[in-house]
Image (cartoon, rainbow, N blue to C red):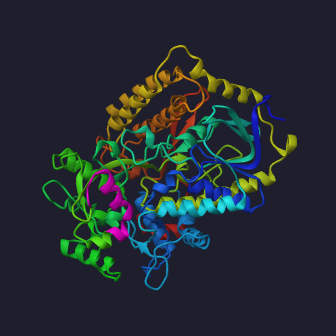
Amino acid sequence: MPPVTNLETHSHDVVVIGAGGAGLRAAIEAKAAGLSVGLVCKSLLGKAHTVMAEGGVAAALGNVADADSWQVHFRDTMAGGKYLNNARMAQLHAMEAPARVNELERWGAVFDRTPDGRILQRPFGGHSHARLAHVGDRTGLEMIRTLQDRAVAAGIDVYMEATITRLITGRAGATAAFGYWRATGSPILFRAKAIVLATGGIGKAYEVTSNSWEYSGDGHALAYEAGAELIDMEFVQFHPTGMVWPPGVRGLLVTEAVRGEGGILRNKDGERFMWKYLPDERRGEYAATDEEATRWVTALSEGRRTDARRPPELSTRDNVARAIYTEVKEGRGTPHGGVYLDISYLPPEHVRRKLPSMYEQFKELADVDITKGPMEVGPTTHYVMGGIRVEPDSGATTVPGLFAAGECAGGMHGANRLGGNSLSDLLVFGARAGAGATSHAINQPSGEAGFPHVDPVNVREATRELAAPLERVSGDDPYAIQRDLQATMQSLVGIFRVQADLDEALTQLAALRERGQRVQVAGGRSFNPGWDLAFELRNLITVSEAIARSARQRTESRGAHSRLDHPETDDARWGGLNSVVARAEDGTMAVSTSSLPTVPDELRALLGTAH
């Protein structure tokens, strides 16, 4: 029986919240085990943010670079993450990514091919070899198409345009997910033996972001409110290249594939500036001259191997983003506040074939032909490395019955994510979270009708929360709160941070939380975007506070976290420590540290003597 009379209720062995790559892969895994699976998505099926991932999926297939291996991929991932990654997650990812990509091909994904018919791979920043399997610059779209077809064919029950506002928990852990239909506003309850969160990132906390509208930190906040821990929330990745003009498309992603195919970054004076910003310890990995970089690009475009080193534009994302920010701040930026990214020196047909989406995007939105001239680009909020703390092998959180995968899960990427690792991450750990949820659902003790007890008090509280913004006769405008939140995060918790700014951000966030608790929305429940925003704001404020508190705590610069008042990386104090965000007993947010798991000797040997 439903815990509240007349409440629409659906029961499944496993409920997956989020229908991007991680959610689809988790649902497919659970369904393959013969379980009843419900897939809940805030948007329409096929509209997940994964479709906006363009450049490729990282896996050591070795189709272009014979010397590539999972061991090299593991080392690159750990180095890119400044060794703050969970080493077990990085190991599983590197070892299993090739199998997951090949599986995707068997399921119908159509990748670009080498001359002898194998999956083609391209280079990306921070990767030692050409490692990204791709479909032009539309890889995420092809992945979603393939996974969606597989999920629908398997008979997974899909609930579209449904927003989850609360996880219902009890002595058995997570027992249900409560939310509402976006079209009608009617409440809905999903009972489950296991729940998988795969809700993506937090980009809408910032003014300038490459993320789609769905990315409001839902999974992070739902898990936190349910008692799970968040880790590494200070590490927010600002992708180096988003569109800067016109204003309506500011922040829209310009894929790293442009630089992977030979795109050159220049400032307003025509200087190829990335040479100045290469870290000393990794300078030897990059071309030393224009001639060497050109030799590398020429060999790449002709499908030849070369001993030339990769161009400086293929440094890690955190480094390139800081470089662009610095060039603009010091007065060497373009008219619209960015830098130039130029690939027009390559043959036009090559550019259009390799980068069809970028060609169309700039032609339609900015009236720029990238085969004839440069693009204007600048940093944009892109990805959060931090997320829900999970057990590496199963995706289990600290709340029984609750699992997480994809961008909302933390640990895999450490302090900075390498391009392409997100798509293989969601395949590897989507499958593992699906398997973990399956095992839990099969083995847990059964209650009423085979499902754990759902606390009716929790459900009634969640039902009252839904109505509250509409019932208030006065209160704050959700859109005004969102604007103020984004301005706070963009200006005070951005690429570069200092103590005073972070203190001020936390003061402003506390005021925003109070305003959010008395938000008032006009109109009814049906198709009311202001009402939708009221619940997303709560999540955005929660994740913003977690980011700011974690950033204030970490008094060093590491990866995507750059403190101007603490510019050095302090391994003596901060090496091997995660920031941990948890809900305190009094309901406030507590931030502490936790040591990373010990790295086994066989993995440590792959990293060199320094680590």
Q: Which residues are magenta?
A: 352-369
| 463 to the left or right of 215 | right
Q: Is residue 186 magenta?
A: no
Going 68% across and 32% down the picture, which residue do you hit?
187
Going 63% across and 27% down the picture, which residue do you hit?
466
The overriding secondary structure of the stretch rendered in magenta is helix
**Nearer-the-camera pick, 53 or 456:** 53
So how many labels did they put on this image? 0
Quarter of the N terminus within the rendering: top right
Q: Position of residue 422 (x, y in %)?
A: 49, 58
Quarter of the C terminus within the rendering: bottom left
Q: Compared with residue 319, is residue 492 higher up or lower down, i.e. above or below?
A: above
**Nearer-the-camera pick, 206 or 292:** 206
Going 67% across and 58% down the picture, which residue do you hit?
152
Q: Position of residue 203 (x, y in %)?
A: 44, 43
Q: Compared with residue 198, is residue 517 higher up or lower down, i.e. above or below?
A: above
Q: Is residue 366 magenta?
A: yes
